[in-house]
Amino acid sequence: VDRVVSQSPPSRDADLQSLGLTSLSPEHMAKLAGASTLNLGGNKVRSLQGLPALPGLTELGLVGNPLASLRGLGALGLSLRVLSLKGCGATAHAALLSPALLSQLAGLQRLAIDSASLPPGGLDTLRAALPACSFDA
């Protein structure tokens, strides 16, 4: 991550896709403080617990990571507008239904998920909790 971040010119877009990342260390993620878009797709991240508050982050791509939990996602607060969780598995999708997490993600405008990975009634729960959000399910 250090090499990618240091070799890239300052940008509002951070593409860390398919780098084999297994975790998100706070020191690496802190270097992305100015990013508005962060693509972590295609890695092996199982936890978001190293994700610091990134107040300018509006778009987060986690496609294809084997997430065991979404704990840490709430650190992004209400600035997050687009969240992509396709291919992250049933555990991540079920965690998305947590009322506490949904209240922290109230600003979402677009959510990409695998609706088949949600528990019964899960998509209806998401639509009710995030009425301003469009779903790519």
Image (cartoon, helix red, strand yellow):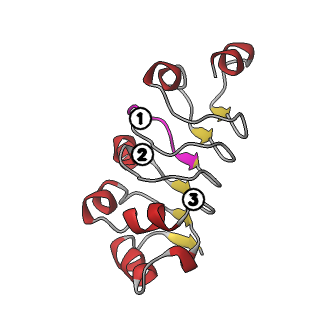
Question: Magenta includes 14?
Answer: no
Q: Are marks 2 and 3 in contact (CB under 8 Å)?
A: no
Closer to the camera in the image, 98 or 58: 98
Whether residue 80 sits left or right of residue 128 in the image: it is right
Seen at 63% across and 54% down, the residue is 63
Tag 1–tag 2 contact (CB < 8 Å): yes
User: Which residue lies under the disc numbered 2?
Assistant: 79
* Predominant secondary structure, magenta span: loop
The mark closer to the camera, 2 or 3, is 3
Q: What separation in Å lies between label 2 and label 3 (alpha carbons)?
A: 22 Å
SS assignment at label 3: loop
Q: Give how far apart the Cα atoms at labels 3 and 1 are.
A: 24 Å
Mark 3, residue position: 88
Q: Position of residue 10 (x, y in %)?
A: 66, 19
How far across and down, in percent of the image, does residue 62 sit?
59, 50
Q: Residue at x 41, y 53 (%)?
A: 69
Distance between the Cα atoms at labels 1 and 2?
6 Å
Image coordinates for residue 40, horizontal then vertical, percent: 62, 41
Q: Residues within 10 Å of mark 3 (few under 14, many from 20)?
A: many
Q: Residue at left 60%, top 40%?
A: 37
Residue highlighted by disc 1: 55
Looking at the image, residue 27 lies above or below residue 104: above
Question: How many numbered marks, from 0 up?
Answer: 3
Q: Please give the name of the residue rendered at 71% of the width and 40% of the height, measured from the top-left corner.
A: 17
Residue stretch in magenta: 51-60
Can residue 53 be found in the magenta stretch? yes
Please, what is the three-letter code of the amino acid marked with disc 3?
Answer: Cys
Q: Give, as a three-letter code, the residue at label 1.
A: Pro
- State which quadrant residue 36 falls in: top right
Pointer 3 and pointer 1: residues touching (CB < 8 Å)?
A: no
Q: Secondary structure at mark 1?
A: loop
